[in-house]
Image (cartoon, helix red, strand yellow):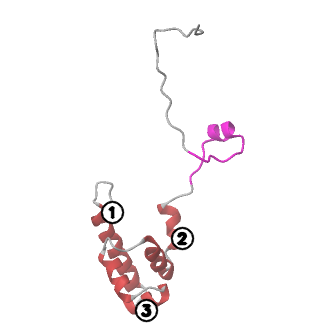
Amino acid sequence: MDIKPEFTDELILEEIGKRLNQTRLAQNLTQAQLAEAAGISKRTLERLEAGATSTQLPTFIRASRALGLLPSFDKAVPQPQASPIELVKLRGKKRKRASQKRTQKRTSKKWTWSE
């Protein structure tokens, strides 16, 4: 099943858990073996494979590392590439924060010095 934007968080976690389970089985590893290699408890791995919302990202990363899946994270979260125009604007500097869209308020009153 492809993960789609309209899926709920729970459904996505369940699908990721299924994929981890299938990858573990394809590598002929038991849950105990993978849990030991990842440095997590077997029960934590069971929850991760079940798609439980109580698991944490570091747990997922440890299991993924033990399964050799970390290189595929580059596809999931690619390094952002600046456009050529943005590179010219920044003159080699990196962006450090996001900017808000500017809205111009038009007023009919002209500015004058206060007296």
- Dot 2 or dot 3, earlier in sequence: 3
Q: Is residue 73 magenta?
A: no
Helix, strand or loop at mark 1? loop
Q: The residue under label 2 is which amino acid type?
A: Pro
Q: Secondary structure at mark 2?
A: helix
Classify 35 as above or below 68: below
Badge number at residue 2? 1
Q: In the figure, is residue 11 to the left or right of 107?
A: left
The residue nearer to you, when weighing 113 against 83, is 113
Q: Amino acid at mark 3?
A: Gln
Q: Read off the magenta span.
A: 80-97
Position of residue 71 measured from the top left corner of the image (x, y, whole percent): 54, 70
Residue marked by disc 2? 71
N-term-proximal mark, 2 vs 1? 1
The residue beneath circle 3 is 33
Q: Is residue 19 above or below residue 75?
A: below
Given the image, on which type of amino acid does mark 1 rest? Asp
Distance between the alpha carbons at the discs numbered 2 and 1: 19 Å
Which of the pair 49/18 is nearer the observer?
Answer: 49
